[in-house]
């Protein structure tokens, strides 16, 4: 279900012909895709770095706001 929109776009672009592929494979489009991918990876890494210590604190210590 996650890849359904991407599959739909690939099918539509393949039916559109060479002009659509030329537009998608432009350097500016690929650069935007690379920046988006880099941002997603950076956000995932920062989230992991912040959440792992918080999870350890919650499970291994007796925090006052901890719910049992």
Image: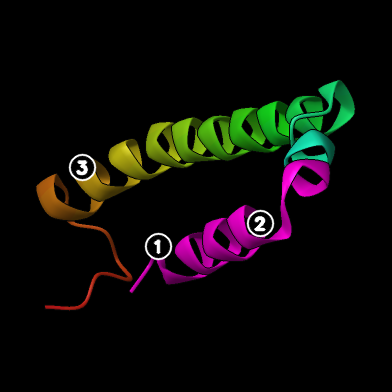
For disc 2, the marked residue is: 13
- Identify the residue under disc 3: 56
In this picture, residue 1 sits left or right of residue 24: left
Query: Mark 1 sits on what residue?
Result: 3
The answer to the question of whether label 3 and label 1 lie on touching residues, with beta carbons closer than 8 A, is no
Count all numbered tags in the image, as a single digit.
Answer: 3
- Binning the other alpha carbons within 10 Å of mark 2 as few (below 14), some (14 to 19) or many (20 upward) gives some
Mark 3 or 1: the one toward you:
1
**Of marks 2 and 3, the one in the foreground:** 2
Would you call the spot at circle 3 few (<14 residues within 10 Å), some (14-19), or many (20 or more)? Answer: few
Indicate which disc residue 41 carries: none
Which of these two is toward me, 8 or 18? 18
Q: Nearer the viewer, residue 60 or 32?
A: 32
User: With 15 as the anchor, is 52 left or right in this view?
Assistant: left
- Residue 33 in which image quadrant: top right
Residue occupying image coordinates x 33% and y 74%: 1
Q: Which residues are magenta?
A: 1-20
């Amino acid at each position: 279900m996650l890849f359904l929109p991407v599959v739909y776009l690939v099918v539509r672009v393949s039916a559109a012909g060479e002009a659509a592929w030329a537009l998608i494979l432009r350097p500016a489009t690929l650069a935007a895709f690379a920046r988006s991918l880099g941002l997603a990876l950076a956000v995932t890494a920062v989230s992991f770095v912040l959440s792992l210590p918080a999870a350890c604190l919650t499970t291994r210590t007796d925090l006052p706001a901890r719910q049992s």
